[in-house]
C-alpha cells in the first residue's frame, strides 16, 4: 500500500491516536492488524475507567455530604424534630477544596436554600 494513500494516512492517524489514548490510560499499547479495532478497544477501556472514576467521586461526595450533615447537626446549624431536619438559617454554605489532575487545587463555596436540600 502506498504511504501517501488515504487508507495509509487513516491507519497512521488511528495508530497515533491509539498511542496517545494508551498513554493517558496508563496501559501498554497493543497493536493488531486493524488500527480501527485498536481504537474501539481503547475507547471501551476509557469508558469503563470513566464510569469507575465517576462512581468513586460519587461515593466520595456522599461520604463528605454525610459528614457535613452530621457536623451541622452537632453544631446546631440543623435540628432534627419529629423525624424531619430543620435549618434555622436562610442559606446553607458548604466550602470544598478540589484537587485536579494537574495537581492544582481550588476552593469553591456552594450556597443552597434549605428547601433546595429538602430541609424544613
Image: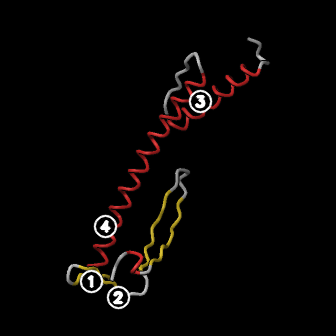
Spot the residue most to the right.
4
In the picture, the disc for residue 66 is 4
> What secondary structure is found at the residue carrying circle 4?
helix
Residue that numbered label 3 is attached to: 18
Check if mark 2's residue and mark 1's residue have beta carbons within 8 Å: yes
Residue identified by numbered label 2: 88
Q: Residue beneath label 1, please?
A: 79
- The mark that comes first in sequence, 4 or 2, is 4
Between 108 and 85, the residue placed more toward the observer is: 85
Characterize the local packing of mark 1: few (<14), some (14-19) or many (20 or more) Cα atoms within 10 angstroms: some
Q: Position of residue 113 (x, y in %)?
A: 43, 80
Display coloring: secondary structure
Q: What is the distance, in whole Å, between disc 4 and disc 2 at their CAs?
A: 19 Å
| Left or right of 91, for residue 82 | left
In the image, residue 9 sits, relative to residue 50, either above or below, namely above
Residue 62 sits above or below residue 11 on the image? below
Q: State left or right for residue 46 relative to residue 57.
A: right
**Of marks 2 and 1, which one's residue comes earlier in the chain?**
1
Tell me the quadrant of the picture where the C terminus can be found: bottom left
The residue under the point 30% across, 75% down is: 71
**CA gap, disc 3 to disc 4?**
41 Å
Categorize mark 4 by other alpha carbons within 10 Å: few (<14), some (14-19), many (20+): few
Q: Dots 3 and 4: beta carbons under 8 Å?
A: no
Mark nearer the N terminus (1 vs 4) = 4
Amino acid at each position: 500500500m502506498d504511504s501517501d494513500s488515504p487508507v495509509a494516512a487513516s491507519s497512521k492517524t488511528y495508530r497515533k491516536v491509539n498511542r496517545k489514548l494508551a498513554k493517558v490510560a496508563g496501559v501498554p499499547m497493543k497493536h493488531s492488524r486493524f488500527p480501527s479495532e485498536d481504537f474501539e478497544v481503547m475507547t471501551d477501556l476509557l469508558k469503563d475507567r470513566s464510569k469507575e472514576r465517576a462512581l468513586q467521586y460519587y461515593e466520595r461526595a456522599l461520604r463528605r455530604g454525610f459528614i457535613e450533615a452530621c457536623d451541622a447537626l452537632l453544631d446546631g446549624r440543623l435540628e432534627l424534630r419529629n423525624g424531619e431536619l430543620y435549618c434555622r438559617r436562610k442559606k446553607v454554605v458548604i466550602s470544598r477544596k478540589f484537587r485536579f489532575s494537574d495537581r492544582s487545587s481550588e476552593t469553591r463555596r456552594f450556597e443552597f436554600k434549605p428547601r433546595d436540600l429538602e430541609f424544613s
